Image (cartoon, helix red, strand yellow):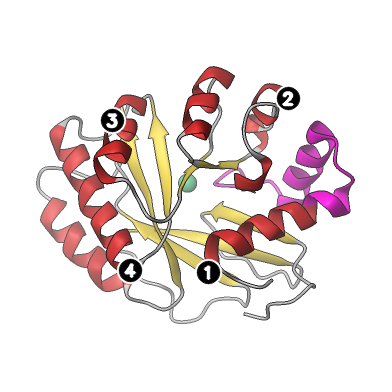
Amino acid sequence: MNPGREIRYIDFHSHKPGGRSDSLTIMNLMAGEDVPAAFPANTLFSAGIHPWQLTDDNCEQLQAELILTAAHPHIVMIGEAGFDRLRGVQGELQYRVFMFQTSIAAEMQKPMVIHCVRGWVELLRAHSEYGPARPWVIHGFRGSSKLAASLDEKGFWFSLGKEGITPDILNTVSHDRIMLETDDSGRSIDDVYRLFAVTAGYPEDEAADLIRGNFNSLFNYRL
Ligand SMILES: [Zn+2]
């Protein structure tokens, strides 16, 4: 990685590696996927057990694999991990495997990137049970402003894609805990930044500085 002011865009959650000289990308790996032997500059990784991949049969194996992957120096976050009430195995197993990942994150002192579809009760239960030392960043958030307000109040961060960048949400959440992402949309991160700047009422340079500052405070980096 080449940290410095030349990084203008940070794609906080993507399923593709980066490669642009003006952007830093955090590429997500599902448990069982290794950090590629070769990857473009300015690419970091998150690794976690996604609720979609979890079954009664693979749970032990995924946990063992995640422990190995998470030790790689380019893994900066645990996740995406979380709760999905519409897809994947439901109930106690989802909760238990999420809590397993919170313990890895705690041990490695890393933030978590959270996938949550209608599982807010479980997420809040885990958050209050655990009291994480490093931030939990909800990616792809597009819920109501009421939900955003209650999560914001508990100190959650938000990684927003195009659908989550609305006046309602931006009027509700703390701007010093926002990141931006493309996820699997195939959009360019520039477009997401542009929409964020316009919707929040920032000049584009100021928006880029804000997000870079948030990234630095989340990871104790100096980009
Ligand atoms: Zn994703």
State how far apart marks 4 and 2 are (Cα): 36 Å
Crowd rating for badge 3 (residues with CA inside 10 Å; few <14, some 14–19, many 20+): many
Element type where label 2 sits in the image: helix
State how far apart marks 1 and 2 are (Cα): 30 Å
Element type where label 1 sits in the image: strand
Instruction: Kindly tell me whether residue 34 is visible in this rendering.
Output: yes
Mark 3 residue type: Glu
Q: Which of 205 and 218 is in front in this view?
A: 218
Mark 4 residue type: Met
Q: What stretch is highlighted in magenta?
A: 180-207
Mark 1 residue type: Leu
- Mark earlier in primary sequence (2, 3): 3
Asked if the residues shown at circle 3 and circle 4 are in contact, with their CB atoms under 8 angstroms apart, the answer is no
Element type where label 4 sits in the image: helix
Read off the residue under disc 1.
44
Numbered tag placed on residue 122 in the rendering: 3
Mark 2 residue type: Pro
State how far apart marks 1 and 4 are (Cα): 16 Å
Identified at 20% across, 34% down, the residue is 89
Instruction: Kindly tell me whether residue 186 is visible in this rendering.
Output: no
Read off the residue under disc 4.
108
Q: In which quarter of the image is residue 60?
A: bottom left
- Mark earlier in primary sequence (1, 2): 1
Read off the residue under disc 2.
167
Asked if the residues shown at circle 1 and circle 2 are in contact, with their CB atoms under 8 angstroms apart, the answer is no
